[in-house]
Amino acid sequence: MTRRMIPLLLLCVTLLCAGSCKEEKKSNDIITKIAPRKKPPRGPQKLSDFKYERQVDWLGSTYTIRIRRFADKELAMTEDEDGRKYYDNKVQLVILRKDGSEFYDRTFTKDDFKAFTDNQYGRDGALVGFMFDRAEGNSLYFGASVGSPDPNSDEYVPIDVSIDNMSHLHITNAVQLDTGSDQPRPAKEKTEDELAEEEGI
């Protein structure tokens, strides 16, 4: 009797195993992991520091131009179009003669260009750029820009800066095309009183 029960028990166990091992239904759903959303940085941001150096032939000699942009937490805060806060920048311009002696050294802030930025960028923008352009005649020419501190933005006010062989500084509006007009904007040059004030006279 017991011997007859053993095959029956084995059969029941086999059927139970087969029932429990049914093939799971296949799904066409694709499961992917969602990357965690980056948290916006807390507190004010800053543009990366920038250094530039170049040797130029000017007035029969070789000069070295060094430009350094860096954030300064002591300056008033600036902000981009979305209201994100940024530290404003300073730009140091150093021009050295061939023998290494100093011809010119000045650190600029946005306030040096306030006569040309009496708009949103003058109030809320930052000093975002300052680059060497060319050596021509008795002057070295540079381009400065004040605008949105967002590094992905191309919104700014272009400004022309020149330094002559007597180390006098001249700042004017950059000549550019107005929207809807093919006439260049007239340059607005600083008065002698404003320049004298800058030179500390």
Image: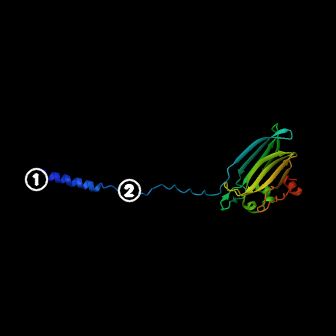
Q: Nearer the viewer, residue 179 or 72?
A: 179
Query: Which disc number belongs to residue 161?
Result: none
Contact check, label 2 and label 1, Cβ < 8 Å: no
Residue located beneath label 2 in the image: 26
| Residue farthest to the right, as pictured | 192
In percent of width and height, residue 39 lies at: 57, 57
Q: Residue 119 occupies which quadrant of the picture?
A: bottom right
Q: Nearer the viewer, residue 121 or 106?
A: 121
In percent of width and height, residue 11 lies at: 20, 53
Q: Is residue 77 left or right of residue 182?
A: left
Q: Residues within 10 Å of mark 1 (few under 14, many from 20)?
A: few
Q: Is residue 179 left or right of residue 47?
A: right
Q: Is residue 106 left or right of residue 47?
A: right
Q: Residues within 10 Å of mark 2 (few under 14, many from 20)?
A: few
Q: Is residue 127 left or right of residue 82?
A: right
Total labels: the figure holds 2
Q: Residue 145 occupies which quadrant of the picture?
A: bottom right
| Residue 116 appears in the rendering | yes
Secondary structure found at label 2: loop
Question: What amino acid is at disc 2?
Answer: Lys
Closer to the observer: label 2 or label 1?
A: 2
Question: What amino acid is at disc 1?
Answer: Met
| Residue farthest to the top, as pictured | 99
Residue visible at 19% across and 52% down in the picture: 10
Secondary structure found at label 1: loop
Cα separation, mark 2 vs mark 1, equals: 45 Å
Residue visible at 26% across and 54% down in the picture: 18
Residue visible at 74% across and 60% down in the picture: 121
Residue located beneath label 1 in the image: 1
Looking at marks 2 and 1 on the same chain, the residue that comes earlier in the sequence is marked by 1
In percent of width and height, residue 108 lies at: 78, 52
